[in-house]
Image: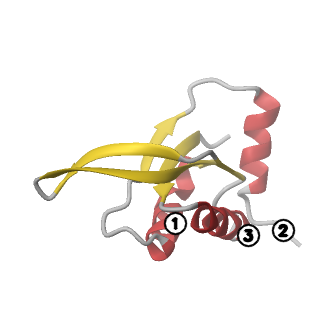
């Protein structure tokens, strides 16, 4: 089974996050996208400390699909430099991990 990863990004609002979530699942580059509640991000950008309200998104997919997933996020993301971070899932419920793999595979037939 291909390695399952968790990819994180933030969107400026819930509508943009939900739109991205639906698109990623429809394209089968993600099995599941969790759109979380609004949070506040504090960061340095172009020499200034900034603060913004954002909606975090957790994307479950296979490592082999990361390049396609990153391209899809960048295509739809409104930020000049979006946060796109992937972390390996070192353990998980085997049936869930298998489901992620199945839902991100192209159906045959």
Horizontal and vertical percent position of residue 44: 20, 48
Looking at the image, is mark 3 or mark 1 earlier in the sequence?
Answer: 3
The image's mark for residue 108 is 2
Q: For numbered disc 1, what is the local secondary structure?
A: helix
Q: For numbered disc 3, what is the local secondary structure?
A: helix
Looking at the image, is mark 3 or mark 2 earlier in the sequence?
Answer: 3
Q: In this view, does 88 lie above or below 101?
A: above
Judged by depth in the image, the label closer to the viewer, 1 or 2, is: 1
Horizontal and vertical percent position of residue 5: 56, 41
The image's mark for residue 68 is 1
Mark 3, residue position? 26
* Mark 3 neighbour density, 10 Å: few (under 14) some (14–19) many (20 or more): few
Query: Residues under labels 3 and 1: Cα distance?
Result: 13 Å
14, 34: nearer the viewer? 14
Q: Which residue lies furthest to the right in this view?
A: 109
Query: Residues under labels 1 and 2: Cα distance?
Result: 20 Å
């Amino acid at each position: 089974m291909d390695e399952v990863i968790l990819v994180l990004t933030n969107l400026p609002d819930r509508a943009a996050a939900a739109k991205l979530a639906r698109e990623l699942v429809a394209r089968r580059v993600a099995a599941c996208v969790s759109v979380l509640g609004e949070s506040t991000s504090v960061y340095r950008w172009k020499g200034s400390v900034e603060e913004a309200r954002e909606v975090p998104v957790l994307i479950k997919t296979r490592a082999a699909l990361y390049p396609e997933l990153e391209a899809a996020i960048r295509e739809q993301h409104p930020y000049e430099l979006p946060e796109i971070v992937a972390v390996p899932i070192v353990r998980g419920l085997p049936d869930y991990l298998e489901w992620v793999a199945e839902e991100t595979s192209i159906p045959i037939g």
